[in-house]
Image: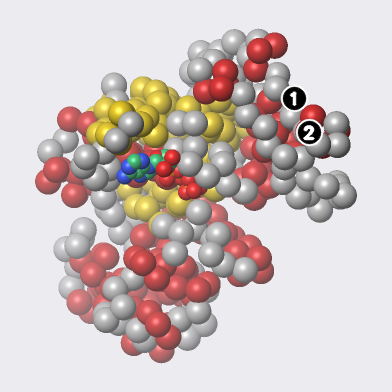
Amino acid sequence: MTDLLDVQNLWVRFPTRNGIFDAVRGVSFRLGRERLGIVGESGSGKSMTGRAILRLIRPPGQLTADHIRLDGEDLMTKSEKGMRAVRGSRISMVMQDPKFSLNPVMRVGDQIMEALRLHARVSRTEARKRALEMLEAVSIRDPERVFRAFPHEMSGGMGQRIMIAMMLIPNPELLIADEPTSALDVSVQGQVLRIMDKLVQDRGMGLIFISHDLNLVAQFCDRVLIMYAGRVVETCDADKLHQATHPYTRGLLNSMPRIDAPQSRLDVLSRDPAWSEAPSVGPDDRGLPELPQPGPAGLGNLGADIAEGK
Ligand SMILES: Nc1ncnc2c1ncn2[C@@H]1O[C@H](COP(=O)(O)OP(=O)(O)OP(=O)(O)O)[C@@H](O)[C@H]1O
């Protein structure tokens, strides 16, 4: 069966005063109709990977890849016009903060209708009906009122649900959610995630969920890619994340609070330059070859600073 998405040897480079900076370095992965988490610390290249799939890297940034296949069709060979037909219609992206994505001077309902009418030939009446249904699907209690409201009248959680409604109304095959709930408080976060999860499952979509929160990804996704310095250093099933072997992943896990394992002090994440050079580890259940485990050189002294009382 063809993968929904097949990314091979993806690079994103930026020219800087000090030479070329490689933000994404040879990332490869495949995705079925499943939930794939991409985790890593700030600057590890998660967002650039998401944006690159949609070919949304602005010049002077450069994007190269052997291929980025969506349902077998290579997006790298598409014209810009061809890509515009993919964005929003076959692949949608939900960003971190709805304030920057919603048009402040346009009513919520009109924005959702526009998201649909850009990609599908439907009458205004039909678009209105589907927009109201979509608002209900994202658990907006009074869809008629919200339909007429402006974005500034919405709370953060409502704004993010409206964004999800806008992104899902054209029925994309793949949703890329880049830290979709990190601007929300924890209870609203859980609610928004549950809604997104249900919609993705009901519609049989693929989901790429970008987050720095390993615990969230472990609960929410099927599989996880762990990124460090622009590379994928490990892939694993999300429910095995807490048994991950790569020292960087272990470091990330140990530097995060866990309710079930209280710690008086969290570990400080240490880094080893070798991690960004060594091949990635972990079985890839979508058929990629199994890569070698990291050698002893990769076993940094995680938490040693704390152990030694530094
Ligand atoms: N226009 C640019 N010019 C140079 N470097 C850039 C540019 N845009 C992004 N970068 C760099 O690319 C790297 C990867 O950025 P990216 O946004 O993908 O990180 P991230 O893992 O998503 O981090 P965060 O969790 O903070 O969003 C970062 O080091 C960033 O500074």
Residue at 29% of width from left, 21% of height from top? 66
x and y, in percent, of residue 166 in the image: 35, 65
Image height check: is 23 above or below 130?
A: above
Residue 299 locus on image (x, y percent): 70, 19
Q: Nearer the viewer, residue 32 or 79?
A: 79
Quarter of the figure that contains the N terminus: top left
Element on which disc 1 rests: loop
Q: Residues within 10 Å of mark 1 (few under 14, many from 20)?
A: some
| Label 1 CB-ligand 1 distance < 8 A | no
Coloration of the structure image: secondary structure
- Is residue 202 shown above or below 24? below
**Looking at the image, is mark 2 or mark 1 nearer the viewer?**
2
x 41%, y 89%: residue: 145
Residue 122: tell me if it is visible: yes
Q: Circle 2 sits on which residue? A: 305
What amino acid is at disc 2?
A: Asp
Residue 247 image offset from top left, x and y in percent: 68, 25
For label 1, the residue is 301
